[in-house]
Amino acid sequence: MISISMRHLRYFEALAHHGHFGRAAEACAISQPALSLQIKELEEILGAPLVERGMRQIRLTSLGEEFATRARSILRAVDELDDLARASHSPLAGRLRIGVIPTVAPYLLPAVMQRLAARFPGLDLRPREAVTQRLVDDLVDGRLDTAIVALPVSEPSLNEYPLFEEEFVLVRPLGEADQPVPSSDMLREMRLLLLEEGHCFREQALSFCNLTPRLSRELMEGSSLTTLVQMVGAGIGVTLIPQMAVAIETRSAAVSVARLAPPHPARTIGMVWRRTNPLASSFEQMAAIVREAGLAGGTSGTGNGPVPPHSRLG
């Protein structure tokens, strides 16, 4: 008699997460027909359907919803048993899945990976870039081991470990470099370029300016900091970016960079992981290395980070 296997659980959890056979198969590194066969076999074992198969996506049945919740719990517990074994031998070795938010990943992740590879050559780091809520969901569900995010995330099941503070700076057209730096109240009246919804940096910038999209007359959105800075260089408006992004994002744009008046807007970058993860002490070692990389990149909140020659730090 065929029984439910860990493979069945992992394949079904991937399908429930992605809502699409093709994407789930890709995530599991198998072919779509092979994944379909495994799901069909699982449904035959249970004697009831788990998914409603549509042309473009699938929907879970009521049984599928409950089964997905139980499967995630089992898979998370199994992964933590593996982590417990690793913690007693060589904790920072083997696969480690780390998430990073988009306003940190391009600027900090390369240095972090280099430092970790030098310090822990047996570590197989698997980075994933996504917005905060997706990373938090994946951590809670056991699809990630840890993540670098802006704190707080306020998820009770996660431990938050602060790393460093980082200021936001104002980016405006190069021709405005000699003009007085606007206050937060003045920014409310300007054409402000911000990241699209879902990015925590957007919410932090809106909070500093004390406005909502509905209150802003000239709010415009972009999908990345690169897009925003290039739009500023074209004279379309002004934007705020984290200090760690200055060197990379402003090197090919005709913009000026200025510190805002006190109290300087800032964010706290930190690492988060599940409180139940046995590798917690190892993550603290890793956090120290991430902090070193961040501070080395000029993200300490002092305003002394690298500024390109064509920009000006006010």
Image: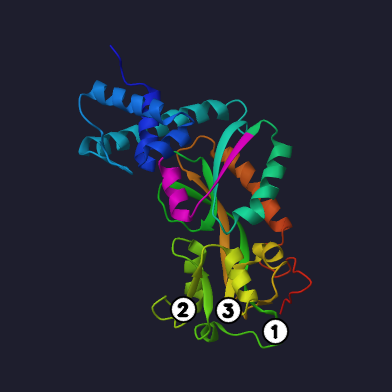
Spatial CA distance of label 1 from label 3 is: 12 Å
- Residue that badge 2 annotates: 210
Instruction: Provide the residue designation for mark 3.
Output: 236
SS assignment at label 3: loop
**Image side of residue 188 versus residue 164, left or right:** left
The residue under label 3 is which amino acid type? Answer: Ile
Indicate the amino acid at tag 1: Gly
Label 3 to label 2, Cα distance in Å? 21 Å
Residue placed furthest toward the right: 309
Q: Which residues are magenta?
A: 124-141
**Label 1: how many Cα within 10 Å (few below 14, some 14–19, many 20+):** few
- Residue at the spot of label 1: 175
Quarter of the view holding residue 102: bottom right
x and y, in percent, of residue 235 in the image: 62, 80
Circle 3 residues within 10 Å: few <14, some 14–19, many ≥20? some
**Compared to 289, does 163 lie above or below?**
below
The spot of residue 28 in percent (x, y) is 46, 32
Q: On screen, 116 above or below 164?
A: above
Give residue 178's position: percent from left, percent from top. Answer: 72, 87
Q: Is residue 138 magenta?
A: yes
Separation of residues labelled 1 and 2 (CA atoms):
27 Å
Q: Quadrant of the N terminus?
A: top left
